[in-house]
Amino acid sequence: MAGELPDKYHVPQWLGTKVRRRFHVMAKPAGAACNLDCGYCFYLSKEKLAGGLGRGRMRDSQLELLIQQYIEGVTAGDVVFSWQGGEPTLRGLDFFRKAVALQAKHARPGQRIENDLQTNGMLLDAEWAQFLKEHRFLVGLSIDGRGNCTIAFASPSRVRRRSTVSWPPSICCGNTTSRSTR
């Protein structure tokens, strides 16, 4: 029937270019894998789910498909990629270099691509910092307690590499977020 609204699954196609579509996706490129084993973590147990997220790692073909389809699906001027985990930095800096290159490849003219990264910071070093600054990543850093107390909540057998960053004692519990501009 002419003029009839489509079902909810076909609304985006029906709307087409009539409106600007914006939505948010959180990608977990390392699945539930983490380099810490914090006793309070709600997500770490997901790696044990049969057929679930497990310790899965996003393959290059999946990365490109995610980036291409996400950019195509957002018709607004800004597209924000949020990288979470487990611990996303376990995928390594080359993975994120590839992600940024694919975003540039698939972005439409005039479209602004942004990236968020939620991390425990344990793998961050000068090379990571330079990359995050260069590509203006918004970084959410999970910090527990004072100083390097994040380690205190972690199982020693799970800590693969300790950060060279020493957090000032004035930082207390919670998350801190900062755009990489310094």
Image (spheres, rainbow, N blue to C red):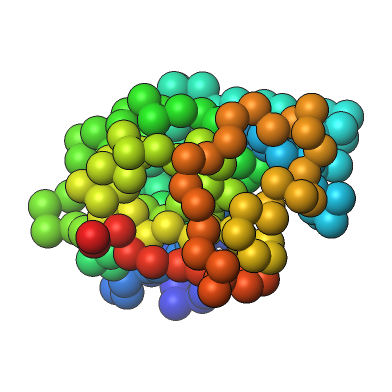
Which residue is situated farthest in the top direction here? 60
Residue 122: x %, y % from top left: 56, 41
Would residue 84 be seen by someone viewing this image from the given angle? Answer: no
The residue lying toward the viewer, choosing from 49 and 118, is 118
Left of 15 or right of it: where is 53? right
Left of 100 or right of it: where is 15? right
Vertical placement of 32 versus 5: above or below? above
Left of 172 or right of it: where is 134? left
- Seen at 32% across and 74% down, the residue is 19
Task: State which quarter of the image contains the C terminus.
Answer: bottom left
Vertical placement of 135 versus 157: above or below? below
Residue 105, image quadrant: top left
Residue 12, image quadrant: bottom left
- Seen at 71% across and 39% down, the residue is 36
The residue lying toward the viewer, choosing from 76 and 131, is 131
- Seen at 76% across and 50% down, the residue is 152
Residue 139, image quadrant: bottom left
Residue 174: x %, y % from top left: 64, 70
Residue 166: x %, y % from top left: 50, 52
Vertical placement of 153 versus 68: above or below? below
